[in-house]
Every structure is written in structure tokens, then in C-alpha cells.
Image: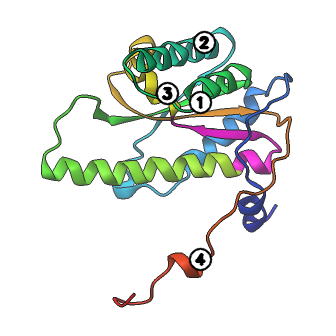
Amino acid sequence: MKIGEAFSRRRSIRKFKSEPVPRELIGQVLEAATLAPSGKNAQPWEFIVLEGVDKEKIAALMVAGAEQLEASGYNSGSARNSAQIVQNAQAVIMVYNPRQKRDAKLTPLRRIMWSVDTQSVGAAIQNLLLKAVELGLGSLWICDVFVAEEQISAWLGRKDEMIAAVALGWPDEEPAPRPRKPWQQVTHWGRGH
């Protein structure tokens, strides 16, 4: 598959078949993630693959986090739906930046490095998603895990920065492409707009 085809075929998959994903294929998507560009070659990523009851625990923590938000008068948005997706996926890959502690104060230099690290991890996640397309897998980049960031990180024994989760499995849907702004609309040449 050419890279352009992977770009155009990638979709956010929210329905998965119950068929297990072989660990060999999960390894291939993780290898692709580690080949991403990395500022200063810091490779600021760690992945935790959760299956079975471990993944169900993450889903339960997300629901509890959504309930807590709602009890405080806030809208939990799509968190409950994302928890259901986590539960139905065959694997969930938690993505962390081990170079950044969750409660660390950011000095000006550390702020720069945090930004560099975050961009590097984003590139790793994108590589993972595109490799999943090539292998015929479906994936969903999930940030709703942040409704239970502290609880999930405590359960996983992590004191570093949670970046996202990625649900992975065999797709059980073929969503149409979402609308995108044309590149000409979001691009400026030089200083003038």
C-alpha cells in the first residue's frame, strides 16, 4: 500500500469485530510508532497494551470519571461512548511520555522540551494509525481517557504524562470520509494573509 492510500483510507473506527488481533500485528503497529520522527531523538514514548479484563478496567474507570464530572455539573461529552469503544476493541494501547512527570512545574526550557516531546509522540501515534490501515486493522485515537487520567495512571502505576489511548481491532464498519478543509484554505504564503 502506498502512503497516500493509507492517508485516504484511514478512518476513526468505533465498531470492532470480536476476532482477536494477533500480538504479532500489534507488534508491527508499535514498531511503526517507534520509527516516527523524534525531536533530539529523545523517543519520548512508552506504550502499554491492554487486552481482556485490563482493557475493561480502563473502560470502567472512564465511566466513573464521566460520572464524577457530571456530578460536578460538567458535561462529560463523548467519554461514555469512548469507554464503550474501549471495552469492545480487541486491544487498547495507552501512550505515555516517560520524560514528563504528571505534576511537574514547567520551567521555560522544560516547556520547550514538553512541546517537542508532545509533537514527537503525536507523530508516533500517527505512524501507528497508518500501519494499522496497511494491516487491515481499525483504530481510534482516544483522548477521552483524560476524564479519568489520575485513576488510570494510578492503576497502571504511572507517574508520567498520559498522552492518549488507541483502540485497535478488526473494523466492523466502513465510515465515509469526514469533510476536510482544502489545503488552500488553511495555507498562507509568506506574511500576508
From mark 1 to mark 4, how far is it between C-alphas?
31 Å
**Few, some or many residues within 10 Å of mark 2 (<14, 14–19, 20+):** some
Q: Secondary structure at mark 3?
A: loop
**Which amino acid is tagged 1?**
Ile
Q: Is residue 181 above or below residue 123?
A: below
Given this view, does label 3 or label 2 mark the residue nearer the observer? 3
Which residue is the site of mark 1? Answer: 93
Whether pointer 1 and pointer 4 mark residues with C-beta atoms closer than 8 Å, the reply is: no
Q: Residue at x 50, y 80 (%)?
A: 187
Say whether residue 169 is magenta: no
**Sequence-earlier tag: 1 or 3:** 3
**Sequence-earlier tag: 1 or 4:** 1
**Which amino acid is tagged 3?**
Ser
Whether pointer 2 and pointer 1 mark residues with C-beta atoms closer than 8 Å, the reply is: no
Given this view, does label 4 or label 2 mark the residue nearer the observer? 4
Q: Secondary structure at mark 2?
A: helix
Which residue is the site of mark 3? Answer: 76
**Sequence-earlier tag: 3 or 4:** 3
Q: Position of residue 27 (x, y in %)?
A: 67, 35
Whether pointer 4 and pointer 2 mark residues with C-beta atoms closer than 8 Å, the reply is: no
